[in-house]
Image (cartoon, helix red, strand yellow):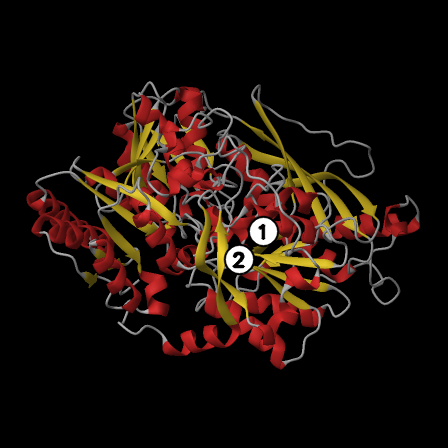
Amino acid sequence: MKFVNEYRSPKIAQEYVAEIARITTRPWKIMEICGGQTHSIVKYGIDKLLPAQITLIHGPGCPVCVTSVDLIDQAIALAALPEVIFCTFGDMLRIPGSERKDLRSLKAQGGDVRIIYSPLDAVKIALQNPDRQVVFFAVGFETTVPTTAMAVYQASQLEIENFSALVAHVLVPPAMETILASSENCVQGFLAAGHVCTITGYEDYLEIALQYDIPIVITGFEPVDILQGIYMCIKQLEAGIVEVENQYSRSVSYEGNQTAQQLIREVFETTSRQWRGIGMIEESGLKLRDRYSKFDAEKRFNLKDHQTQESSDCISGLILQGIKKPTQCEAFGKKCTPENPLGAPMVSSEGACAAYYRYRQLVFS
Amino acid sequence: MINLSCPIPLQQYPHILMAHGGGGRLMQQLIQMFLTAFGTADSIGHDAAILGLKSNKIAFTTDSYVVKPLFFPGGDIGSLAVNGTVNDLAMAGARPLYLSVGFILEEGLSIETLWQVALSIQQAAKIANVKIVTGDTKVVDRGKGDGIFINTTGIGVIEHSQIIAPQSVQPGDLILLNGDLARHGIAIMAVREELEFETTIESDSAALAEEVLELIAANIEIHCLRDLTRGGLASVLNEIAVAAKVGIEIDESLIPVREDVQGACEILGFDPLYVANEGRFVAFIPQKHGDRALEIMRSHPSSHATIIGKVVADQNWLVTLQSVIGSKRIVDLLSGEQLPRIC
């Protein structure tokens, strides 16, 4: 914790809170892209310390929230196969598919669903179970892509025949552009995700900032990081400046992690991908390159035709883009609760709907 | 005690057979093994234990223990099964006296493992000053259990006139916590999932009765006690807030969490407030007795007791937390279990 405590210092945090209040002269809407930042904002009550004129919008940066319902259904179908050991990160277990089924219920019904902490663990499980098919649910943004790439690369090097990945990886910059290009866009400044930029660097963000005339601050995850990121963003907005600034310089460099990028390029290529609640975004996802296609679970299990419909009651897409608030959803707190979620933002602890639900008593009383 | 040798002929039966639950000679050998480990008690040879309880207030509780792996840093299923039930009695303000131990054993379990668990039960019972007076053993087919499941039932006596219950909690009460949070849950997860951290995190599993009885003996007014098992501190405080119809305010900066545990929680995306403990409790105590109670709690070897907050009048019965940066948030009940986050 030696290098963490200073980013949780009440004194420094309060200084930024005071500075933000001092420089804010009008209303501003800032979107934090990353679910990890949303989590910190809720956990530390950062939004409650800000001037009322500043609205934080929780963006689509929760991988649990944006994985398409088709892929969740495919995951559930795969995990139900008796020959399959289905490996997933823990928080994907509760995400409902099209018929409100989830991996957790499937596990209870006998599916061999295992929580893992690294994709490399799935490769290990494949080696230990040569008579079973091991499928890894490759979910997440640029942050988790390098380890998936490493797992596929390793499986290829070791010529493992019983490992494959159901790839659901998505990329942040195309989602930011989709939000900004929308006629209903209300976002005036971005806090970009520090962990993502640690891998990718931030060259791509310069183009977005200039094209859409919007300040972007690469921001970390500790409370002082987020407050400093907000301060830097407001400072630009108030001065009418548009820049890409790097608050998270202790981790992020302009060019990012070149080794990780090289590995990603070796294994993956970009593809258009469906985002849950938002829809198709061009070139916003990753798929395995042809030379690694034998590790593609969709091909191995012939899942391509598996298409399903999202519940029409869920307006998660509008919520993830900041166009509507969770409380403006008719299903919120009635048909849709954390115990019985309709859409993903109510499932994940980082999801905007779950956060609002948690605070409902104060919001409404 | 550790040098006790297992009375079952290990060479002949190194593993549990279905026959160990069949009522015949092998079952008798198994019972003999437990008697050797647990020592003689009042009820030997009878179908039921006959207990002479000189009190008109008896506390009675039961709990089952299912843990994987059976042995973990800082404890094992045997000590857990004793401490857990002893602690439930202690939280009612009772002096724990007697336990029953029921085993459900999986066919194929090593007798040596069972013997180690039995010895651990004996040792934990000795430390907690309780007697094991009755028990039961069943064997289930291989694949139908995780080696050993244990149920313990406990009886204790209440020797004072205090009403220690959520309904006694009042606005103004201080909330005392007897040590650092989240070690048990993280210790189990680390070994279960083979996670490698820089240090070995040991469970906080411990018997709490002695500490509680000392508070009572010192005439500390205690309104409520609760051990922080599954669901952790956050769940317990929510339960008590609702039961007592009060609000609870805690201060994050006063809640001790060890750095290695905090680090592990951050890697896994867990909030230590919701992680399970097996040797931690909160005490709701009127302000006038707070300092003395803290002094007594701190006199126990592993205790880093601290006052973490207070009870307030609140018609919404909310638990709120002052974050380390000075903001306030609601601490709600979890929806289901905590799951490791992706990022």
**Residue A219 appearing in the image:** yes
Residue at mark 2: chain = A
| Residue drawn at x 17%, y 35% as measured from the top left | A52
Pointer 1 with pointer 2, Cβ within 8 A: yes
In percent of width and height, residue A342 lies at 52, 34
- Left or right of A98? Residue A8 is left
Q: Nearer the viewer, residue A188 or B8?
A: A188
Q: Nearer the viewer, residue B130 or B237?
A: B237
* Callout count: 2
Q: Nearer the viewer, residue B171 or B145?
A: B145
Q: Quadrant of residue B330?
A: top left
Q: CA distance from mark 1 to mark 2?
A: 7 Å
**Which residue type carries mark 2?**
Ala
**Residue B162 appearing in the image:** no
| Residue drawn at x 41%, y 63% as measured from the top left | A143
Q: Which residue is mark 2?
A: A168
| Residue drawn at x 41%, y 74% as measured from the top left | A261
Q: Quadrant of residue B137?
A: top right
Q: Which residue is mark 1?
A: A71
In percent of width and height, residue A7 lies at 23, 57
- Left or right of B245? Residue A126 is right
Residue placed farthest to the bottom in the image? A157
| Residue drawn at x 52%, y 67% as measured from the top left | A148
**Which residue type carries mark 1?**
Leu
